[in-house]
Amino acid sequence: MDIFRLIRTGGGERVEFKESLSDVKGIMETICAFLNSRGGYIIVGVDDSGHVKGIDIGRGTIPRLAGMIRDAIEPQVIPR
């Protein structure tokens, strides 16, 4: 799926925008909601209006987020 097309289409039932990674609880809730429905996409660095804000991430950000997801959700989900 083309990320720019998802952003242009806007958030909805299967697309969720998160402006940053700071709302870990909200991200986990969205992941659980997607797991219990038809799936979806979480796009980080985009505000609720669909404006791309971008985020700065360090080398360990993605592995750390993946670890938090693994630790918080049962059965295990593998983020892509």
Image (tube, rainbow, N blue to C red):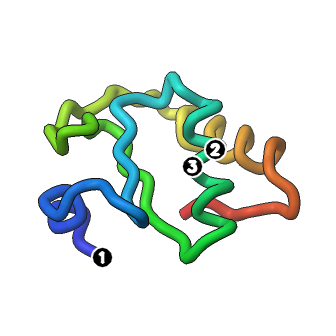
In the image, residue 69 lies at what x, y percent? 71, 46
Q: Quadrant of residue 62?
A: top right
**Residue at 80 percent of width and 51 percent of height:** 73
Residue type (three-letter) at the residue carrying disc 1: Met
Circle 3 Cα neighbour tier, 10 Å, few/some/many (<14 / 14–19 / ≥20): many
In the image, residue 78 lies at what x, y percent? 69, 63
Under circle 3, the secondary element is helix
Q: Which mark is residue 29?
A: 2
Q: Which mark is residue 1?
A: 1
**Contact? badges 2 and 3 (CB < 8 Å):** yes
Upstream in sequence: badge 2 or badge 1: 1
Position above or below: 31 against 63: below
Locate residue 8 relative to residue 33 in the image: left or right. Answer: left
Residue picked out by circle 3: 30
Q: Quadrant of residue 36?
A: bottom right
Residue type (three-letter) at the residue carrying disc 3: Thr
